[in-house]
């Protein structure tokens, strides 16, 4: 029994260094990249961040019984994320039940049936509720005759466009998978660079229209749209750079 306990302690000792798993770090860095670009466009006075807790009920805000504890990948790296966001603007954290109550007060409906649907009611409705919590808040009050609570403040929700922001889906370098050719040279595969001075993900203008650099050959460059559907392979001399890659693509 003692040997089993000791082995378990050793196996988890490397997880006490506060490091993030590479997949989680990549997701958080994508979020930070989006925040960075937004802060360049809009003056940012405050960032509101929903802090997820598995032991709190989303409706009442009360702690759950221990048997009701859960886990979500969204919870991993929250403290690290808050430290990074502080570099852009002051950060205010709110709880999940506050987001839920604000969303219901504003009359916004959340699509809980299909969580993968690329629509506002699935992915953006909570973000609007979190932002609106700066202007409307539920507060308890006490008077001589009664105790209660009510919503204070006002905010107007207006329609907005919905876009999906993602990374350019180009292949990573995989030299370890390529068999060396004669002379010990491996053929080029993956990576973000091309032979013509462009990088994959660069926004360019071409005879086929405006698109993103998605690949290259010896004399041509592949240009794709925001959904990474190829527009065509075009001579590099006919390509004009509009903007260097930011690591982000805005798709419809």
Image: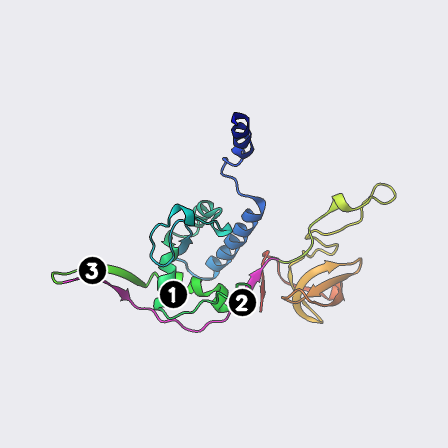
Q: Quadrant of residue 126?
A: bottom left
Residue 135 percent coordinates (x, y): 32, 63
- Name the element at disc 2: loop
Any mark on residue 141, and which?
A: 3
Q: Is residue 175 left or right of residue 77?
A: right
Q: Secondary structure at mark 3?
A: strand
Q: In the image as oriented, which residue stretches furthest toward the top? A: 2
Q: Position of residue 13 (x, y in %)?
A: 52, 32
Is residue 182 placed above or below 165 in the rendered structure? above
Q: Nearer the viewer, residue 160 or 197?
A: 160
- Inspect the magenta stretch and tell me whether residue 158 lies in it: yes
- Is 133 displayed left or right of 230 in the figure? left
* Mark 1 residue crowding within 10 angstroms, few (<14) / some (14–19) / many (20+): many
Q: Bounds of the magenta span?
A: 146-167
Check residue 212 in the rendering and tell me which mark sits there, or answer none. none
- Residue shown at 53%/34% (left/top)? 12
Residue 24, visible in the rendered structure:
yes
Q: Is residue 15 magenta?
A: no
Residue drawn at (71%, 48%), measured in percent from left and top? 173
| Spatial CA span between label 3 and label 2 | 40 Å
Which label was assigned to residue 103? 1
């Amino acid at each position: 029994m003692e040997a089993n306990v000791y082995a378990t302690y050793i196996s988890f000792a490397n997880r006490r260094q506060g490091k993030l798993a590479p997949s989680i770090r990549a997701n958080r860095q994508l979020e930070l990249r989006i925040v960075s670009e937004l802060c360049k466009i809009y003056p940012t006075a405050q960032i509101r961040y929903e802090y997820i807790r598995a032991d709190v009920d989303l409706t009442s805000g009360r702690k759950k019984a221990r048997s009701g504890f859960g886990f979500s990948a969204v919870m991993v790296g929250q403290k690290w994320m808050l430290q990074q966001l502080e570099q852009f603007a002051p950060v205010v954290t709110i709880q999940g039940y506050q987001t839920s109550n604000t969303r219901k007060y504003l009359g916004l409906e959340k699509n809980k049936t299909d969580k993968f649907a690329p629509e506002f009611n699935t992915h953006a409705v909570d973000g609007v509720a979190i932002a609106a919590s700066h202007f409307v808040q539920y507060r308890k009050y006490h008077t001589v005759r009664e105790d209660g609570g009510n919503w204070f403040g006002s905010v107007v929700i207006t329609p907005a466009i919905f876009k999906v922001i993602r990374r350019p889906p180009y292949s990573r370098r995989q030299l370890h998978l390529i068999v060396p050719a004669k002379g010990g040279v491996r053929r080029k595969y993956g990576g973000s660079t091309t032979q013509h001075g462009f990088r994959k993900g660069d926004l360019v203008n071409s005879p086929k229209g405006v698109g993103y650099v998605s690949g290259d050959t010896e004399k041509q460059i592949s240009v794709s749209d925001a959904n990474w559907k190829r527009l065509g392979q075009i001579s590099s001399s006919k390509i004009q750079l509009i903007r260097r890659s930011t690591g982000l693509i805005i798709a419809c």
